[in-house]
Amino acid sequence: MDFDFTEEQLMLRGLARELLTAECPPTEVRAQMEDARGYSPSLWRQLAETGLLGIAVDEAHGGQALGMVELALVLEEMGRAAYPGPYLPTVVLAASALAAGGSRAQLDRYLTGIADGSVVATLALMEDRLAAGPEGIELRARAQGGEYVLTGHKRFVPFGHVADLILVAARTSEATDPRAGVTIFALDRDTPGISHQPNVQIDLTNKTSTLTLENVRVGADAVVGQVDGGWKILDGVLRRASVAAAAVMLGSARKCMELSVEYAKVREQFGQPIGTFQAIKHACAEMLVEVENAHGATYYAAWALDAAAPDAAFAASVAKSYVGEAARKVCGSAIQVHGGIGFTWEYDLHLYFKQAKLLEALYGDAEHHREQVLTEILAPAAVPALA
Amino acid sequence: MDLNESPEHRAYRARVRAWFEQHRPGSLDTFEDRRAWHRTLYDAGFVGMGWPKAYGGQDASPIEQAIVGEEMVRAQVPGTINALGIGFIGPTLIAHGTEAQKQRYVKKILTAEELWCQLYSEPGSGSDLASLKTTAVRDGDHYVVNGQKVWSSQAYNADYAILLARTDPTAPKHKGISYFILDMRAPGVDVRRLKQITGSSEFCEEFLTDVRIPVENRIGEEGQGWELAQTTLGFERGGNLLARVTAHKLTINRLIEVCKTLPRNGGVAIDDPLVRQKIGKMLAEVEVLRYAGLRLLSKLEKGQRPGPESSVDKLYYSEMDKRHQELILEILGPFGQLFEGGPPEVALNLRSTREDEGSWAYNYLWSRAGTIYSGSSEIQKNIIGERVLKLPREPRADRMARA
Ligand SMILES: Cc1cc2nc3c(=O)[nH]c(=O)nc-3n(C[C@H](O)[C@H](O)[C@H](O)COP(=O)(O)OP(=O)(O)OC[C@H]3O[C@@H](n4cnc5c(N)ncnc54)[C@H](O)[C@@H]3O)c2cc1C
C-alpha cells in the first residue's frame, strides 16, 4: 500500500513542470489564444524531444510505455500551465484508440508519428445528442464496393482543425443495443469531403470545432479495430480520457488555490491582509479540501486503470464526476477571492477557470458519470470496492 | 504508487473476517452485554491494537488496525465501548502520563473495566476552550476543583474523566491550564444527563463543587494542560477513515435496497433519474473519502504523523455526512422521519453502534453533531487556513491582549 509517487514519477513531473514553466508562461498561452491554430508547433516539438508525446506509446513505436499515472502527472502540469494544445486529444484519445485496435500499418504510421511529434491527432465522438455514451453516435458509414462512405457531422472535436489524423466514430449497422454497430475510422486531414467550423466558446485555449463529413470515402484499411466493434475500444478510451481530464482539472484547481492563498496574504483591505478575514480564509480552506480530494480521486483512478483493477471503470467515473465539480468550485472561488482583479482579462485566473469548464463538459459530465457510478454498483458483479 | 492490498494483508483480512463470522455478539440489550462483547473483542486482540504490548496493546501496524476497523463495521457488529478512552485518552496517557499512571489506568481502558469521559467544554467555553473557568487550587497534596462542565459524552457511565482546569488565573489564558484525571465518583461531582436533539441522552453536564483531586492525578506539569489537550484533539481528529467509509457504504447499500421497492412516480425509486443522481453522488463522495483513508494509511505506514492536515479529512467527512443524510431524507420522504413503526422494507435495518436502534431519522439528526464536536467546521477551516495554508492569523481579542 503506497499512495506516494516513485522517484521516477516525481522526476517526470519535474521535467514537465520545468518545460512548461519555461516555454508556456501565461504570455504564451495568450498568444496561442489569439492564434487560429491555437497551439505552438515549436513547443510541440519540444514535447516530442523530451519524450512527453510518446509517454504512453509502446517502445516498438518510439514511446516509453509508461502508464496512466505518469500521463496524469504530466496532464496535471498542463492544467497548472493552462497549456493550450492538442496533447490530451493526441496522446490520450487517439493514441489509446490506436493502441487498443490499430492495425500494424496504422500503428507504424500513426502511433510512431504521435511519439515523434509528426502527427497531431484527435477523436470525433459527440454529435447533436451530446451523449457521452454510444447512443450519441448517429453519423453513418455506408459500405460501398469495398469502401465506406461517411456522411454527417461531429461536434466539439478537440483541435480537429489542426489534426493530421481524425478518428471518427460512426455507425455501420443498426442494433437495439447502441453499443453494437459502432466503427472507428482513421481519416487523414486532407481526405476530400472534410470541413471544419471552429467553435466560438468560453475556453479559447483548447479549441474545438464542428466537423462535417460529406460523402467522405475511405478504404477498409481505415477501420481501427473491428467493423461494428468500435465501442469496446471507445469505452476504454473514454475511461482514460475521463481520468486525463480529471488530471488537467486538478492542475487548474491547484494552481487557482495557490494563486488565491498567495493573493490573500498580500492584498490588504480595511488595514489588513484579506487572508485574515474568515470569509476568505474559509474559502481557501475549502479549496484545499477539494484539491486534496481531487488528487486522491485522480491518482487512484489512474492507478486502477494501470493495474486493471476490477473497480477501474467505477474509479474513472468517480474521478470525472468529483473532480469536474471540485475544479469548477475551486476556480470559481479563486475569482471571488481575487475580487475585481479576478474578473480582469489581463489577470490569468480566467485561463484556468475556462479550461476547467470545458473539460467538465467533455468526456461525460458529472451527471453522466454519476449514473455510471451507480450502474457499476448495481451491476451483477458489483465492484469489490464496495464492502 | 501501489494501492493493492499485499498478500499478507489480504490473508490477515481473511482471518479477521472469518473471526467475525465465527464470533457474534449474543444479546446486546444491556450495557453489561455490550461490555461483554467488548471484552471478547479485546481478547481477540482487536482493541487498542496500535498501543504498546507493555500496556495491553498489540503493537499492530496502522493497516492491520484499519482492516479490523473495516471488518468490524462490515460484520455489522457493535464496535468497542469506551470510545473516548480508547480513541484518545489512552494514547494521551501513554504519551504524557507517568509510569505509575500508565500501569494504573491504561489496560483497564482497553478492557473497558473502567469507562472514561472528557470534561473539556464549559457553558462559556466551547470553541474558545482556553477561556475555561473551572479552577483547581492547590491545597497540600490535593487540588480543589470548582466549576461547571457540559456536553460531556457518556459521562453518566464514566468511572474517570480527563479534566481541564485553570491552575493559574494570573497566567495568559493558554498557559494557566492543567490536565487531570478525575474520579467521577469523588464527592462533589454531580452529573446530570442532558437530552439531545435525537431524543436520547448521551451527553451530560457536571457541577464540580470542592472536588479533591490528588496531585499524582495531574498529567504532565502544572500549566501544561493546553499543550496536552492539543495532542489529544489530534488523536481524536485522526479517526479511522476507512471504517467510516465502510459504515457509509453499508448505509448506501441499504438505501439502494430500499429504493428498489420504494414506489415513486409510478415506478420504483431506483429508476428515478433524480434519485439515481443523488445516490451516484453519494457513492462518489464516499469513494473519495476512501482514497483519503488510503492516503492517510500510506503516510502512517511510513511513520509520518499527520498534523493539522487531518482537519482536511475531518471537515470533509463531517460535512459529507450531513449532506448525505439530507439527500437520504429527500429520497425517502416521510418514511425517513420515522424512528420506528414504518414498513420494514423501508427501514434502515442496520444495527447501530450506538445505544439507539439504528434509523434513518436518528442518523439524520446525529449528522448535525459531527460538524460541531471535536472542533466545529468553522474552527477546522481556521486551522487549515492558518496552520496548513499559512494565511495570516485572525486578529483576536485574546491574542491582542497578550501582545
Ligand atoms: C454530540 C456532542 C458531543 C460532545 N462531546 C463532548 C465531550 O465529550 N466533552 C467535551 O468537553 N465537549 C463535548 N462536546 C462539546 C463540543 O466540543 C463543543 O460543542 C464545541 O467545541 C463547540 O463549542 P460551543 O458548543 O460552545 O459552540 P461555540 O464555540 O459557542 O460556537 C458557536 C458557533 O460559533 C462558531 N465559532 C466559534 N468560534 C469561532 C471562531 N473563532 N471563528 C469562527 N466561528 C467560530 C462555531 O463554529 C459555531 O458555529 C460535544 C458536543 C456535541 C455536539
Image (spheres, coloured by chain):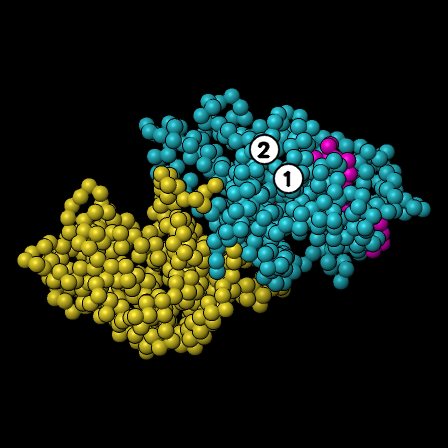
Chain colours: A yellow, B cyan
Q: Where is residue B291 in the image (x, y as percent from the top left)?
A: 50, 52
Q: Which amino acid does label 2 sit on?
A: His
According to the picture, the residue beneath numbered tag 1 turns out to be B44
Is residue B345 placed above or below B285 in the rendered structure?
Answer: above
Point 21% across, 63% down: residue = A103
Foreground residue among A261 and A226? A226
Q: Mark 1 lies on which chain?
A: B
Report whether residue B292 is seen. no
**How many neighbours does mark 1 have within 10 angstroms: few (below 14), some (14-19), or many (20 or more)?**
few
Q: Could you say which disc has been placed on residue B23 in the image?
A: 2
Q: Do the residues labelled 2 and 1 touch (CB within 8 Å)?
A: yes
Q: What residue type is labelled 1?
A: Ala
Point 90% across, 47% down: residue = B138
Q: Is residue A102 left or right of residue A46?
A: left
Point 76% across, 58% down: residue = B401
**How many neighbours does mark 2 have within 10 angstroms: few (below 14), some (14-19), or many (20 or more)?**
some
Foreground residue among B390 and B270? B270
Which span of residues is magenta-colored? B153-171
Report whether residue B105 is seen. yes
Q: Where is residue B78 in the image (x, y as percent from the top left)?
A: 60, 34
- State the separation of the CA atoms marked 2 and 1: 10 Å
